[in-house]
């Protein structure tokens, strides 16, 4: 198989972890006889410095010509003060919109060897295996107007939560398709007792459910979901929700099992290319020190093998290698316990490669 | 002191727990020589059944003529299917708006004797003492338009996040005033990297902070806050945020210490009356069985003594009595551990009374 992969390392630890994913993919390519061709593009603060904007045209072009995209992380204090239109995060929002990446998938999994770093009791998180599906190109993030205004002489502001029904439908369908291959349960999250958009969301979920008679659909209010996520995360299989609720709940979900530095994500469009990135940020405080945990990025590459290229065996191989490295006791500083020996970024990458 | 208290028991367990609060207040009144006069009003499903709407005019009138309001809980499956405009929750939203209850205060406290029922590890929650201040009368909850629409022939929907700067200012000020009497830290939560309303929120917080030089202000993005709440809740003193973020985060906060059935809330306006209610719902499944936990409602009455009537000693007395009852091992079923003897609602009320 021959595939073009766009690599956008971004800022902070993005570069270090992206390097790890590329190395692992090269090793997988050699082993299984695939040709992975890597091309590099700029995004985020780095792109602001070099090109004056967080997502230069050539990066968009590169992505559109590629079969899949690997993104490291963007942002850092250096660019915090700049005009919101050219802040690093704007690059993220723009790439989602440009490539129509409407479905953000974030698995939260339980790694037995990491349970000690979880804030939750082991009996609460043991065996947690949930997949958050977040709508990524609509809602409050992109609705217009989003501006200051004058309300009868008083200073005021408005943001707009706008959705087309078709935008709700496609992401909810994606959740059902994914649930059908898993434990066959979809929890759809909304605020139907307050928002009209949530009432349309709930109706749409009911309509989609008719086409998936084997998948069980349940509705949950977002405030209750924020509680249930902490008190009983095991109840969830696939969770689907709109953009802003998804932003909040997926971050909440990501810390449950104590493996934030381990969690990958995929952002899917209708016809590709898809984008894969670790859910952690650019961690400017530890950037360049060879201490970042590259496993979330490597697991993102595994998701890419599966979701973009259909390479299930290869994806499983990478995931197995990561698990073995953890079971063997290797730990970057973020997941090390007190007194445990700490492994560097480059050593961690080498260990995963050795396990392949 | 002579005070008129409006009691709105509402639905489900609302009636049982409201009765508890009234009994305790009567005992406090006798002991300290206050005249508390209770008048009863309808709200929620109960009001829909009797009056055709969740918040009848006579209830609004009663509240406006009272010095403070005690609310039980509203809602239940019986009214889930009815038209959104006459659902029980609408009564809640309407009373907030009618009485201008713009600041919702929810303390989350650690009860040592209940830590076992928390999903979090003890070292994470030990000593948690946070006060959530949620804006309660603006934002997505009340913004217009909130309706279905046609977008170039496609079915679509819009909700509106609208705030006046003055609405932000008054609730943020309230947070600073409260923090000044506590550990002097305000965490203001927004999504300033995406929403224009959040950027105005952040500016307003900075402006208000200038008047409280002894209070430390920090900003946190809502997604990060949803993580930090689980991983390190002890860092928070007073947390202030807009309506929808507050709905989600305050429910998340409420389950941290394992004492959801114990948590009171207060909703404040500029000139009163204020409203006090437990944060738990109407729990229709256990209603009428004399098993509900009345302590959140009793602690709400304590907040009323303090916030509405300035009766600090009396409020402390009630809180002390509740703590002693717990320390003595009395447990309603929601907070009992396996094998522990279970106390009924009426017994629990009697025990608190006996400790006064
Ligand atoms: C950086 C920010 C704009 C972004 C979001 O809110 O979507 C981030 O929090 C995420 O979840 O990817
Ligand atoms: C019942 C509902 C409308 C209400 C809200 O969202 O405000 C409730 O969740 C609350 O927090 O008091």
Image (cartoon, coloured by chain):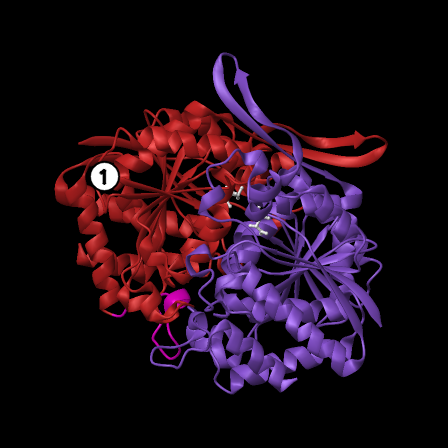
Chain colours: A red, B purple
Mark 1 chain: A
Tell which of B322 and A330 is nearer to you.
Answer: B322
Q: As drawn, is B306 to the left or to the right of B347?
A: right
The answer to whether any part of residue B201 appears in the image is no
**10 Å crowding of disc 1: few (<14), some (14-19), many (20+):** some
Q: Relative to residue B64, is residue A127 depicted above or below?
A: below
Q: What range of the chain is rendered magenta?
A: A329-342
Q: Relative to residue A258, is residue A11 depicted above or below?
A: above
Q: Main secondary structure of the magenta part?
A: loop
Q: To which quarter of the image does residue A37 belong? A: top left
- Callout 1 secondary element: helix
Q: Residue at x 55, y 40 (%)?
A: B87
Q: Relative to residue B240, is residue B294 depicted above or below?
A: below
Does the stretch in magenta take in A139?
no
Does the stretch in magenta take in A334?
yes
In which quadrant will I find the N terminus of chain B? bottom right
Residue B149: % across, % down: 55, 20
Count the marks.
Answer: 1
């Amino acid at each position: 198989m021959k595939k073009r992969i766009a690599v956008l390392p971004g800022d902070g630890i993005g570069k270090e972890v992206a390097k790890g994913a590329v190395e692992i993919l090269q090793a997988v390519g050699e082993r299984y006889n695939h040709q992975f061709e890597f091309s590099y593009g700029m995004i985020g603060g780095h792109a602001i410095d070099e090109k004056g904007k967080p997502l230069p045209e050539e990066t968009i072009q590169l992505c559109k010509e590629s079969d899949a995209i690997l993104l490291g992380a963007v942002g850092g204090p250096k660019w915090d003060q700049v005009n919101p239109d050219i802040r690093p995060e704007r690059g993220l929002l723009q790439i989602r919109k440009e490539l129509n990446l409407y479905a953000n998938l974030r698995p939260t999994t339980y790694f037995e060897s990491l349970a000690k770093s979880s804030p939750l009791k082991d009996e609460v998180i043991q065996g947690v295996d949930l997949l958050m599906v977040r709508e990524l190109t609509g809602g409050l993030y992109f609705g217009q107007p989003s501006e200051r205004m004058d309300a009868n002489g008083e200073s005021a502001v408005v943001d707009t939560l706008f959705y087309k029904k078709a935008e709700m439908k496609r992401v909810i369908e994606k959740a059902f398709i994914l649930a059908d291959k898993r434990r066959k349960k979809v929890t759809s999250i909304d605020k139907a007792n307050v928002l009209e958009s949530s009432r349309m969301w709930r109706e749409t979920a009911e309509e989609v459910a008719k086409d998936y008679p084997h998948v069980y659909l349940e509705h949950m209010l977002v405030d209750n979901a924020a509680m249930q996520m902490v008190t009983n995360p095991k109840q969830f299989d696939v969770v689907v929700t709109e953009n802003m609720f998804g932003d909040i709940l997926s971050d909440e979900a990501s810390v449950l099992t104590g493996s934030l530095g381990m969690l990958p994500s995929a952002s899917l469009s209708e016809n590709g290319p898809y984008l894969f990135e670790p859910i952690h940020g650019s961690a400017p405080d530890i950037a360049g020190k060879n201490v970042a945990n590259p496993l979330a990025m490597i697991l993102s590459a595994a998701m890419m093998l599966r979701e973009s290229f259909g390479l299930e065996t290869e994806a499983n191989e990478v995931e197995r290698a990561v698990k073995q490295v953890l079971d063997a006791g290797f730990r970057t500083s973020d997941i090390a316990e007190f007194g445990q020996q700490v492994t560097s970024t480059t050593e961690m990458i080498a260990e995963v490669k050795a396990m392949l």
